[in-house]
Amino acid sequence: MNQPVLIKSNKYGMVVRLSPNLEFDKLQLAVAEKFRESSRFFQDARMVVTFEGRDLSEEEEAALVDTITENSEIEILCVAGERPKDEEYHRQAAMLSEQLKNAGQFYRGDILDGENKEFDTNVVILGDIQPLAKVTSRGSIVVLGSCRGTVAAGYGGDRSCFIAALVMKPNTVQIANRAVRSAIVKRVDHEQYPLDPRIAYIREDHIHVQKLVRGIMLDYLAGHTEKPNPAAQQNS
């Protein structure tokens, strides 16, 4: 590529293509210059960003995020991995990312069949949960990909937690001491599905799964959350 940094953006997100061979220090300077030049186009923007063109370490990725925010008025909601780059993906990812503005942590990559991942805080998973994987979190879980397998939020009894995903096709969903198993989804399902963000939460002592559209979380948090119940225990 002739330019060290190229930006392709839409109203919800951007793809930043990076030179694969330039020394990182020089690349970081080029990113700073590019976003200073483009800052007037991104005033008060809240976006999902995807880096492509070279492999980045977590430290390099964090440094580039800082460089972008320091040289523009962009608020980066999250950094997506090798995901679809179209506007619809960025729109849906931005909507889900906003639900956990104070996410405890991000997990990058797919959670593979047979893996069991545990988190102590809210978590945004930048990848897919495969059908024979299991994810457990003491907080809420947002999946910027396909949610299959067994997914449990609110471990320890927090019934105010939720699970949200761009594709919601799990075998089992559990929140605090309530669980529901799908009678429809195949146990091993690797099919590709269109983006269809949904959220699972507890209301009236039952798990509800609802289509997630912008604004629904405000209603949920305002009136439908159940307070944490420390005495409630997770079903095994």
Image: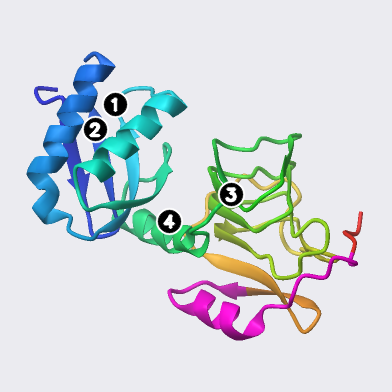
Q: Amino acid at mark 1?
A: Gly
Q: Is residue 147 above or below residue 21?
A: below
Distance from Cα at disc 1 to Cα at disc 3: 28 Å
Query: In terms of sequence position, does the residue under pointer 2 or pointer 4 come before the other?
Result: 2
Residue matched to label 2: 17
Question: Closer to the observer: label 4 or label 3?
Answer: 3
Query: In terms of sequence position, does the residue under pointer 3 or pointer 2 come before the other?
Result: 2
Residue matched to label 4: 93
Mark 1 vs 2: CB contact within 8 A: yes
- Give the percent coordinates (x, y) of residue 186: 73, 53
| Region of the chain picked out in magenta, as a range | 210-232
Distance from Cα at disc 3 to Cα at disc 2: 28 Å
Distance from Cα at disc 1 to Cα at disc 4: 21 Å
Residue matched to label 1: 53
Residue matched to label 3: 104
Q: Residue at x 31, y 33 (%)?
A: 64
Mark 2 vs 4: CB contact within 8 A: no
Q: In the figure, is residue 69 to the left or right of 199? A: left
